[in-house]
Amino acid sequence: MKLFSKTEMQSLESEGVYAGVSLWEMMAGAGAQLARAAIDKWGQPKGPAVVLCGKGNNGGDGFVCARELAELGAECAVLLLHGGPNTDLAAAAFARLPPSVKVLSPGAEAEAALMGAWLVVDCVFGFGFRGELDRISTGYLRLANSLPCHRIAADLPSGAECDTGRVSPDTLRAELTIAFTGAKPAHESYPAKEYCGEVRICPVGIPPELVSKAGTSGEVTGSEHLRALLRPLDIQAHKGSQGRLLMVCGSWGMAGACVMAARAALRCGVGLLDIVCEERVYPLLAGAVPEAVFTVLDGPDRLFGSLKAANACVLGCGLGNGQESLIRQVLGCCPVPLVIDADGLNFCARTGFDLSALPVPHVITPHPGEAARLLGRSVAEIQAGRIPAALELAKLSDGPALLKGAATVTARPDGRFAINPTGNPGMAKGGSGDVLAGMIGAFLSQGAEPFEAARGAAYLHGLAGDRCRDRLSARGMLPTDLSSELLEIFKDFERD
Ligand SMILES: NC(=O)C1=CN([C@@H]2O[C@H](COP(=O)(O)OP(=O)(O)OC[C@H]3O[C@@H](n4cnc5c(N)ncnc54)[C@H](OP(=O)(O)O)[C@@H]3O)[C@@H](O)[C@H]2O)[C@@H](O)CC1
Ligand SMILES: [K+]
């Protein structure tokens, strides 16, 4: 599914106008959809509706909605939070308000009306909002959030930034958000996603062929992207043709990370798995992953030989921070695509290693803590703007960056990004990331393009997690349970 940024939406609007649909028709469509959606969701009005309106076109949608609600028999008031409209379009909508719709300004009467509302329609800001909410909006949105009324948002909950998914404190908490024409990044990325409630996409008159042809830099990953990764196996396949993956993972005290990454990679069809490890962890790993071969480290020559033989390499899961020279050697001479996870990333953050100088394709897979270390920010800052953080990480490393967490964001250095819709809180457990790194490594070793490998693996990983939750509960499921669900998913794909 495409995600339209503010400028992408504006150019689509212009194309719509060029195709003969006026902006006024679009606004009339938006306001009507909003009123209809509220009635459709909550039935005939059981009390007054208050439409909170800003100065821009989102406010204009609100005036149309107020007229529609009044025509449906609702007692309705509009509250002009920032004075009269400042666009011709919104002004035209304002001029068409019927006399039965009360027009209020901030003050005691407005507060009393809001407190008695059955329905609050949020038309303060749409995709034009950026930065922080002003004092007046904050006060009224906070009041609206505290009331036992229904709340519907026009396009976006006011206080949520369209392109970044950032929110201000007191952003409207909607039960239902009507996204006009198409979804926006903020509908799918946290923290804004949490404020949207149910999101319905409603056309407002732009010809559908223009919408489907429009290019967007953001999208939501879907099963079609996974299908593209899971190509049918060649009837003449042999172990050498199914991808040879090298793992430089696991250490004394953290062998489990390597085991989980290795098993996940094998489950994703890797033909040959070679694990580089210290001598003392070899017996442990050999018992846990009998399918793998091992490069037991007794000198750099063995490492170089294994790297050269591989099609891809996973570096970092469970390596700890005592393996600097090993990590340095891999980063310094790896001739094949690389997944850099966990302690590989911590090494880069600690030493300032320039990931953009790597001569081979590479994917970085930080969780918010690792991302914070790489970008020199706090975890809270990363989480407040996950899309921009992922884009910045992709630029920093000059390769795809996958920022883990709810609605994982995979970004490319050129500004394109994908948000992952699968997964659940049951996956927030040590080991989940190791499984994901192994899966990405597997697809890379089988020749997938790095961004596609990362976003497809994230989708598959979350899908397996959702099936685990349904079977085992979110609380009780473990990262090691993901494997059995991968098998079921692959069976479904092979049957189709
Ligand atoms: N695409 C479609 O299909 C259709 C889209 N339509 C609708 O148009 C909406 C977009 O309208 P829009 O461009 O007028 O922007 P909108 O969100 O109303 O806000 C702009 C105002 O907010 C202000 N402002 C910004 N940040 C602020 C802050 N922090 N604190 C205070 N003020 C702040 C900003 O001020 P300025 O930056 O100009 O100083 C400006 O005055 C879209 O979401 C949808 O609802 C439909 O009508 C037709 C079909
Ligand atoms: K809004």
Image (cartoon, grey):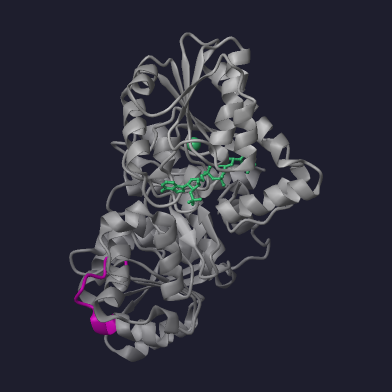
In-front residue for pair 4/82: 82
91 sits to left or right of 149: right
At a point 19% along the width and 69% down the height, the residue shown is 252
At a point 29% along the width and 89% down the height, the residue shown is 299
In-front residue for pair 241/131: 131
Q: Please state the horizontal and vertical placement of residue 355, each as a whole percent of the image.
A: 40, 79
In the displayed structure, would residue 129 be above or below residue 297? above
Give the quadrant of residue 467: top left
At a point 60% along the width and 53% down the height, the residue shown is 225
Q: Please state the horizontal and vertical placement of residue 115, each as a whole percent of the image.
A: 35, 18
Q: Please state the horizontal and vertical placement of residue 328, each as a whole percent of the image.
A: 31, 84
Quadrant where the C terminus lies? Answer: top right
Q: Please state the horizontal and vertical placement of residue 251, each as a whole percent of the image.
A: 23, 70
20 sits to left or right of 331: right
In the displayed structure, would residue 455 be above or below residue 196? below
Q: Which residues are magenta?
A: 317-326
Give the dominant element type of the magenta stretch: helix, strand or loop.
Answer: loop
At a point 58% along the width and 34% down the height, the residue shown is 60
In the displayed structure, would residue 100 be above or below residue 441? above
In-front residue for pair 430/258: 430
Q: Is residue 5 visible?
A: no
Is 324 in the magenta?
yes
140 sits to left or right of 130: left
Is 205 in the magenta?
no
